[in-house]
Amino acid sequence: MTVIVSEKAFLPWQVLADYERLRNGLQGQIGAATVFVGTLRSLSQGRPVEAMTLEHYPGMTEKYLQLICREAGEKWQILDSFVQHRYGRILPDEPIVLVAVWSEHRESAFKACRYIIDELKSRAPFWKQEQTDEGLRWVEKNT
Amino acid sequence: MSIKVRYFASIREVLGRNGDELAARSGMTVAKVWQITAQIDAPVNTIVAVNEEFSDWQQSVSDGDEVAFFPPVTGG
């Protein structure tokens, strides 16, 4: 299980390739991997979005992401999980979040990945502020 | 030792600061902390956390605790 909260922009497929290459101990066991990537769109509620700033609660954020991954591991039989989430200023088309789960069979990987991203959206302390042509506005509700 | 209070996102902006510190009194709750430090009604849907865990307004707090107030989360 790995959780990374970072300001740095990342390429999800590169991150996963590096992670899988350096990971030890799961050779021959993985039968399924699921990946979710959340990306910033350039349109929100009909307004063009120039950028977004993500604020977070350092410490609590990592704690809850780890808790959510642990819960996923208790609910489904998974071999490993990985979450990377950005904070700070993000531009359209840049990835915001990456969730990946590895398991023996696809069902657990699909369900655990879905659980992690859904729980992250409702429990990880991040707040989005969009910069549109009308100025800055806090996103009030997660979709 | 005191209670460390932190504000995030729209609540930080409304109050115009990142946080406060205050001395705990016996039987102090999260609601009391807000009342003393913020001195305005809490925005609807304000979420509270104590020591980096989701909590509620009736939770008791003491010196050394960290209390945070923030709007509903919108990550992912």
Image: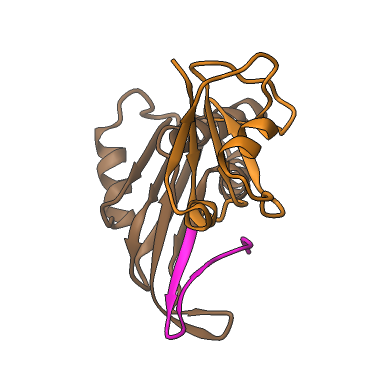
Measuring from the top left, give residue A8's x and y in whole percent. Answer: 26, 52
Q: Quadrant of the C terminus of chain A?
A: bottom right
- Compared to residue A41, the image places residue A66 above or below, namely above
Q: Confirm whether residue B1 shows in the render.
A: yes
Q: Quadrant of the N terminus of chain A?
A: top left
Measuring from the top left, give residue B44's x and y in whole percent. Answer: 72, 54
Q: Which chain is brown?
A: A
Residue range in magenta is: A128-143
* Residue farthest toward the right in the current orientation of the protein: B58
Q: Confirm whether residue B55 shows in the render.
A: no
Between A83 and B69, the one nearer to me in the picture? B69
Measuring from the top left, give residue B11's x and y in whole percent. Answer: 54, 52
Instruction: Identify which residue is drawn at 63% across, 25% down.
Output: A74
Would residue B71 appear left or right of A42 to someone viewing this image? right
Instruction: Identify which residue is drawn at 67% across, 49% down.
Output: B42
Between A23 and A50, the one nearer to me in the picture? A50
Question: Drawn colour of chain B?
Answer: orange
Measuring from the top left, give residue B31's x and y in whole percent. Answer: 69, 34
- Compared to residue B5, the image places residue B73 above or below, namely below
Instruction: Identify which residue is drawn at 42% across, 45% down.
Output: B18
Which color scheme did the rendering employ for the protein? by chain
Would residue A105 appear left or right of A65 to someone viewing this image? right
